[in-house]
Each structure stands twice: as structure tokens, then as C-alpha cells.
């Protein structure tokens, strides 16, 4: 779960930087920098999605295993 938070925070910061930088960009170089930052943000967003899928699959598997366990009193 900490891996998910790490990539989510990176994605959030890079995305904010890209947006704010693009809004004040006046030159091609600045627009290029904001585009690169947005590409990095998109890539980390993909990693976040993959990690999310893995977490859900692991939890689902654990839930199935827990369902099979019989509680005896």
C-alpha cells in the first residue's frame, strides 16, 4: 500500500507542476517542459493504476481464502 501512496503523491505533485507551469508558459521551451512533466505524470498515473489493480486482486484473493476458513467456537 505504501507503494501506491508513493506513486500517487508523485503523480499529484508532477501533475500540479505541469498544470501550473503550462498556465504561465510563454515560450516553446516552457511548453516543452510542461509537456514532459505531463507525460511523466501520465506514466506515474499508469503505475498507480497497475498497483491499484494488484492491491484489489490480492485483497480479493485474501477475501476468498478467509471465506473458506470455518470459525469454530
Image (tube, helix red, strand yellow):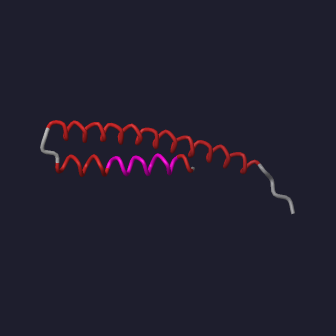
Q: Is residue 8 magenta?
A: yes
Residue visible at 41% across and 41% down in the picture: 44
Res 72 → quadrant: bottom right
61 over 70 or under it: above or below? above
Q: Is residue 12 magenta?
A: yes
Q: Position of residue 21 (x, y in %)?
A: 23, 48
29 over 10 or under it: above or below? above
Residue visible at 44% across and 49% down in the picture: 8
Looking at the rendering, the stretch of residues picked out in magenta corresponds to 4-15
Query: Furthest residue to the bottom?
Result: 73
Residue visible at 24% across and 52% down in the picture: 20
Query: Furthest residue to the left?
Result: 26
Q: Position of residue 12 (x, y in %)?
A: 38, 51
Residue visible at 16% across and 46% down in the picture: 25
Q: Nearer the viewer, residue 38 or 51?
A: 38
The kind of secondary structure the magenta stretch mainly shows is: helix
Q: Position of residue 22 (x, y in %)?
A: 20, 46
Compared across the picture, whether 34 is left or right of 67 comes to left
Res 37 → quadrant: top left
Compared across the picture, whether 15 is left or right of 27 comes to right
71 over 10 or under it: above or below? below
Q: Nearer the viewer, residue 23 or 62?
A: 23
Q: Quadrant of the C terminus?
A: bottom right
Total labels drawn? 0
Amino acid at each position: 500500500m505504501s507503494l501506491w501512496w508513493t506513486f500517487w503523491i508523485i503523480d499529484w505533485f508532477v501533475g500540479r507542476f505541469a498544470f501550473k507551469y503550462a498556465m504561465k508558459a510563454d515560450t516553446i521551451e516552457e511548453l516543452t517542459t510542461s509537456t514532459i512533466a505531463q507525460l511523466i505524470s501520465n506514466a506515474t498515473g499508469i503505475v498507480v493504476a497497475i498497483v491499484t489493480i494488484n492491491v484489489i486482486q490480492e485483497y480479493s484473493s485474501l477475501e476468498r481464502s478467509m471465506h473458506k476458513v470455518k470459525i469454530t467456537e
